[in-house]
Amino acid sequence: MPAKYIFVTGGVVSSLGKGLAAASIGCLLESRSLKVNLMKFDPYLNVDPGTMSPFQHGEVFVTDDGAETDLDLGHYERFTHAKLSRDNNWTTGRLYEQIIAKERRGDYLGKTVQVIPHVTNEIKAAMKKVAQDVDVAIVEIGGTVGDIESLPFMEAIRQMRQELGREHTLFVHVTLVPFIAAAQELKTKPTQHSVKELLSIGIQPDILLCRTDRFLAKEIKSKIALFCNVGEEAVITAKDVASVYEVPLVFAHEGVDTLVLKYLHIEAKDRDLSKWEDIVHRVYNPKDTVTIGIVGKYVEYEDSYKSLKEALVHGALAHNLKLQINWIEAEGLEAGDATCEAQLEDYDGILVPGGFGKRGIEGMLIAIRYAREKKVPYFGICLGMQTACIEFARNVVGLEEANSSEFDPATPHRVIYKLRELRGVEELGGTMRLGAWTCKIEPDTLAHRIYGKLEISERHRHRYEFNREYEEPMTAAGLRISGSTPDGTYVEMVELPDHPHFIGCQFHPEFKSKPLEPHPLFSTFVGAAYEHGQKRREAKKSVAVEMFHRPDRVRV
Ligand code: GLN
C-alpha cells in the first residue's frame, strides 16, 4: 500500500506548536500500530541551521547521520519511533543548492530552471523519499501561510493532492483562536483569515487544530466550520497544556486520530496510549522536586537547549520527580566570590551543557570547581566535558593557564584543542565532527555502571577534542578516561572516581532521550542529584536542631 500523506501548515502567528502537533499526530497513529515517518521543510535560505545563532533559531538537533536540523525533529523523535536523517529536514537553501548543482552539471538539458516545476518537483521527490515503507508520512511546512518564502512548499503540497487524490492526502492547518480579555470572548476571525489565505493558494484544509487556552464550545466550532468550509467534527480544540506530553492525549480526546483514519480511509487497530497516560500521570503526580542548575551562555533563551531540558524531564520522570531547572548565566559567576557560592548552593546537581565561544567560560569553570570540591553531582555535556577537563588541569594538576585553544589560541597548555581531522578547515558550515560515533567504555567505571554495556553509540557536534598529551598528568592526578573511540583516537567520556557523581561526555546524549526511554546518563544524574539534595536537606535540618538545643542560643 502506498503511503498516505498528512500536510501540516500553520497560520496567524508562528510558535503555535506545529511541530508538536505533527509529532503528536504521529504518536497517535503509532498508538494504533501504524508506521509513520515525519519531515519538515524550513523555508529559509540557510543550507541548514548549523550556522545560525541559538538565539535566532533555537537548538540545532543532530541526527544519527550527522545532519544539523530543526528542533522540531527532536519532537518527532521523542514522540515516535521514526528514524530520522538528513532526508527528514529540508531548507530552501539546501533545495536550491541541489538544484543549482544539477543545473551546473547540465542535468536540465538546456531548459529554463523555474520554481514550478523544478523546485516543486524537488520538494515532492523529497516527500516521496521519506514516505517509502511507511503507512503515513507527516510533512510539516515551516513558517506561516502567507509568507513569500513558503509559497513553493504550499504549491508542492497542493500538487500532491492533485496527483494522489483526497484519500491519500490530508491538510491539517494549525491556527489560533485567541481569547480577548476585554471582550471576554474567543475570536474566530484570525482563523477565518488564515484559511482564506490558504484557499487563495488552492488549499482547502481538512482539519483545523485551533490553538487556544480553553475548550471551544459547540457554537464556536460551528462558526469556524461554517466560515472555513470544514466539517464541525474537524474543528479541534488544541488547548494549551502544562506538559507537551499531554498533547497526544488532548488530541485523542478530541478524536483527531479517528478523524485522520476516516478521511484517509485507513483501517487500523484500536488506540493504545497507556504508556503516555502513565507519563502524564507521573508529570502531574510527582513525589518530590529535584533542582538542577544549568550554567551556560544561551540560557536566557530556553529553546536553545530544548532537547537538554526534555532529557532532564525524562530523567526526573524516571524517579517520579518534578524537575526544577534554574538557568544560570555563566558570565554572572565570573566574579568568583561568595555571591557565586550563594548562587550555586541551592542546586541538587549542576550541569554545563554544550556551547561555542569564549563568553562565560570562566564562570563555568567556577561552577565546576564548586561541584567538584563540594561533591555536588556534576554532568558536563560536550563543552561541559571540555571545561571540566580545563578546571581539573588548572586546579588539581596545577597547570594554571590550561585552556582550550578555542578560547585562548596562545595558551601554553592546550588541554583541549582543535580536532586533528579539522586542522586547516576554516569554513563553519557542516565542518564539525557530527552524528553517531561508537564509543568504547572502560569496565568498572561510572560510565559502565550507567550504560550497563561496554559499547555505545551517541551523537556528536563538536570541533575540539581532549588533547591526549595531557592524559598522563591528568589521570595520575585522579581523572579517569572512561570512554574513547574504538581506535583510541578521541576521548569521549571522563569522570572522577573519588566523587559521588562527576561525569562528562563529548557527545550529546540529550538527542537520544525519550519520555518512554529516558537516557541513562540523565536518569542516573537526576537520581544522584536527588540523593545529594536529600542529604543536604537532612544535614541542614540537623544543624537547625542542633542550634535549637544549644544552651547559649540567643533567644529573641
Ligand atoms: N565548542 C566546543 C567544540 O566545538 C563544544 C561544542 C559543543 O558543546 N557542542 O568542540
Image: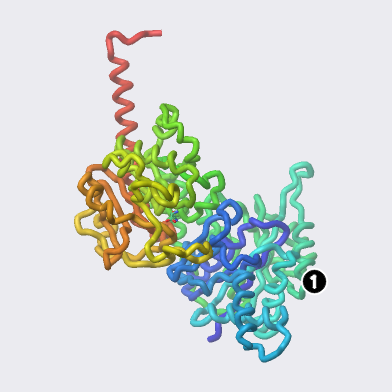
Q: Residue at x 32, y 61 (%)?
A: 490
Question: Which of the two residues, 73 or 91, is positioned nearer the viewer here?
Answer: 91
Can residue 165 be seen at all in this image of the molecule? Answer: yes
Q: Residue at x 46, y 74 (%)?
A: 33
Amino acid type at circle 1 is Ser
Count of labels shown? 1
Q: For residue 518, what is the image quadrant?
A: bottom left
**Residue 228 horizontal/vertical position (percent):** 77, 66
**Residue 198 horizontal/vertical position (percent):** 75, 69
**Residue 510 horizontal/vertical position (percent):** 42, 57
In the displayed structure, 401 sits above or below 469; it is above
Please give left or right for residue 339 compared with residue 166 in the image.
left
Type of colouring: rainbow
In the displayed structure, 410 sits above or below 68; it is above
**Residue 143 horizontal/vertical position (percent):** 67, 63
Can residue 353 be seen at all in this image of the molecule? Answer: no
- Quadrant the C terminus occupies: top left
Please give left or right for residue 373 compared with residue 110 in the image.
left
Please give left or right for residue 395 compared with residue 49 in the image.
left
Question: Which of the two residues, 303 or 385, is positioned nearer the viewer here?
Answer: 385
Question: Which of the two residues, 47 or 324, is positioned nearer the viewer here?
Answer: 47
SS at mark 1 in the image: helix
Q: Which residue is mark 1?
A: 200
Q: For residue 547, what is the image quadrant?
A: top left
Question: In what quadrant does ligand 1 lie?
Answer: bottom left
Q: Residue at x 64, y 56 (%)?
A: 15
User: Mark 1 near ligand 1 (CB under 8 Å)?
Assistant: no
Local crowd size for mark 1, using a 10 Å CA cut-off: few (<14), some (14–19), many (≥20): few
